[in-house]
Amino acid sequence: MVRVYNCHPFAAQLIVPVQHEPETLCCGRDTLFVVSAGCKIEAFNVTDSGCQPICTFNALGKVRKITFSEIASLGQGQDEFVFFQRPLELLGDDTWGSGVLVNLEWTGVEGLTTELQNSLHLRRILYRRFSPDLAHIYSVEETALHSLQLLPMFSTGDLESAAGPGSKDKRVLSLFCFFSLPHVGCLYAVGNMVQQLSTYNYPEKAKQAVISPQFLHVITRSNLLCYTVRCSSVAARDKDPEMDTNNKACPPFFMPVSALRMQLFIGLTAVCLSRNYLILLAKTETQAPDRHNKSKKQSPQKFKAANNMPSVTSEVGWNLYCLQMISTIQLCREMVDYSKRYKACSPQSYVHLLSEAHLMLKAALLDPDVFSQTDREELVSAFKENCTQLGDCYSEFEMDDFHLALPYYKMSGLSLSNLISRRLLWEGDPQKFGKGFMYYLKHSIYEEIEEPLSAETANQVLHVFKLAEPTHIPHALCSPCMRNVCLRTAWDHLERLGTISPSALVTLTKALVALRLEDLAKYQLAMEQYPETRLVSGFVAEPNLLRHHGVVVTELSRQLERNQPGLLVASFVALLESHKINLEEAELFFKVLCVKDSDEETEAETPQLLVDFWEAMLIGCSQEPLIQLLLMKLVSVYIQRISHKQQPDKSPLKTIEDLKNCCSQFGAIYSWIHTINASNSHSMGLPEDLLKLQSILCGSSIDVKSVLPLLCQLPDDDAPGLSVHVLCATRLGECEHVTDRLLDRCPEAVLPFANSVMQQEKQPLWWKKLLPELCRRTKGAGRENRILVSSLKETLTVVASILQPLDFLSILPDEGVASFFLSHLLDCSRKNLIT
């Protein structure tokens, strides 16, 4: 526990003008109720100028305890809770296993409606037994629980917004429960889940305690103790799901609590809290010397006389104090000033005290009763200043959680230029830029800042990297926000770094800077230092060499598209495989890169470089869903180009032979497909896209059913369309349909098709489908078709080599010239005689 004795939260101490000795008291918002003389109750309005009497009234009997409740607080479903003192701690729903039954009884609340009664319910939040602290126990009173309280915190506007809440409607954001033993206090969060936040160990026996979102006040016999609490830490996380990210941070609830300076009060007996005021009741008893304790040597007569004297009554002295709390901003400033003494000798304590101030400011900003625009603006300003201070701590000191510099600096509202200017010493001191600051700087220029920095700020950033982390200079120069940096200075830094720590990344960054300097000689020299495989690794190390924000093309990408497209494609394949980009980002990049003008027809076409990328992705891809996706993309492009007779905008990087040799998804094209291709005359040869499409359909990877919806774009009235349609039908097992289509459109491909497909279980199609169909088509005018006649003869030869003579004879047609079939029947008979 950090003890800050020189800081205390009180600004003024006033006396409450009560008429009689107070016996008990309580507070309700701005009102103080004091019970005296057994049944007399005095009400006071607590203000900055003191406690002003409101009224006095009497109770019907002696008042033993008084509490305050707002009548309206009964339109809200409040949770009830019960504590049971048992040797165990159970939290939340686990408390139902305690075996203790509790029922609600509606005694003395006849005014509640049935609907309101039904809205109230019992919720068990904690079941705990305490192990007695034998060091302090002298009686049963030493183990008694006291000061049981529920503390709600309500939702309000944005923490960092200066605008006050727009409505007075309040919603419970977080709920806390506090209770105390004479020497230990416990604070629990009992909202969405039940967990212990803090344990308070008192230096002496506590008589009573009250808690607020900022402080825990404890009274002992002669001291007022004040501790910090962690309620705002929990509430901030309940309110903002973005907490504990790169955007926002908050000190954790498990951070040790702090004890502020003790305040001496004699005879404290009661305490209560009224907004920004603490009410204390102090009583002292003065008693005349006990004459019975005089010297034992006095005579019996004197002793008897002394006993006959009237007894001396005790005189009670009392005071009722009203302590005004110091403003949150002023207290935080005092804590910051006090913390500076720890900065050099104990950085952890320095950060701790700044974190305490942060939580106090956050608690104040969460207060829905802060309606003043001026007050909120002052709190927001102090909050941002505190965030800057915490950011400086995590930036400068060597701490495990140095990454917190990023969210605290972001919450400070200061620009990168302002933060650098606050820390930059141009004479060069790398110790000023710790891990936290460099983490913030790298995250800002790599991921956050989109607009270019000014030339001055960009040069400052470059200078910081030179001093603190020279190896990150290439990454910094590739950031889009560094475009205004001095290129000559950047080149000099890269030259020096290349000498000390050469790498492909440094070389590629030099190439990028050379392009911006319009020095093609230096660019060419840099690109020739490493083979393409090493250059690819450089692009993987820094994707911003090729693109910014996903789709913004760099000068280096433009140059590679013109001169080394293969390196560009290979680099994006490597980026995708290393999860530096996703497929959609890569596709969008190539589309943006290859757009030459605003012609809509050109923009609608798929650029060849993107097709090259898909083909290159297939070569090393092992994920079946991605393989099918890439195949469908390629098939779609191939079909579109074939149907529209389009040529690619540039020569493909890989030919069909290259793909068949290195990619298993591209299969060998069937011989009968080559026959179909040969039947159509192409003045410039077969389109490469057609061969690639046929190769994919001849492979075993493509799901042909997914291709069928695309075939409507490609009519089968020419050889390319026919080949694609019959290939799909063949893959689907529609051999009889394919036979008819080939006999109609390309009869010369029938026999190659039959030899390729009509095997094993499909062998009967020779005599059940192909032979009868050829016989039918060669009748009459078909005799003039030499292709059909030749195909019929070849089919008879194949069938005769398979069937027995009688089976062969049974399938011959009833009509026809006998001499045409006789030779095949004789061949069938000879075959069987031989066997």
Image (cartoon, rainbow, N blue to C red):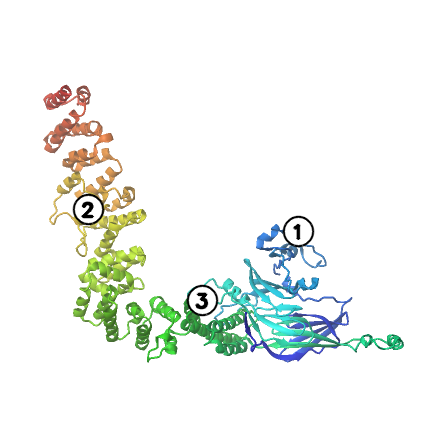
User: Which residue position is annotated with label 2?
Assistant: 660
Q: Secondary structure at mark 3?
A: loop
Q: Which residue, given by chain and number where applicable, does mark 1 sit on?
A: 101
Q: Residue furthest right?
A: 301
- Percent x, y of residue 318: 72, 76
Q: Is residue 677 above or below residue 354?
A: above
Earlier residue among tags 2 and 1: 1
Q: Nearer the viewer, residue 397 or 817?
A: 397
**Total tally of numbered discs in the picture:** 3
Q: Which residue is mark 3?
A: 248
**Residue sitting at 28 percent across and 70 percent down?**
477
**Residue kind at label 2, given as amino acid type:** Lys
Disc 1 marks a residue whose amino acid type is Leu
First reached walking from the N terminus: tag 3 or tag 2: 3
**Residue 236 located left or right of residue 456:** right
Determine which quarter of the picture holds residue 230.
Answer: bottom right
Q: Amino acid at mark 3?
A: Lys
User: The residue tagged with tag 1: helix, strand or loop?
Assistant: loop
Are there few (<14), some (14-19), or many (20+) residues within 10 Å of tag 2?
A: many
Left or right? Give the position of 734 relative to 521. right
Picture quarter with the C terminus = top left
Q: Secondary structure at mark 2?
A: helix
Judge from the rendering whether residue 321 lies leftward or rightward of residue 805; answer left or right. Answer: right
Query: Which of the 4 image quarters holds residue 278?
Result: bottom right
Compared with 792, 123 (above or below) is: below
Image-quadrant location for residue 134? bottom right
Give the spatial CA distance, label 2 vs label 1.
78 Å
Which of the two discs, 3 and 1, labels the residue nearer the N terminus?
1
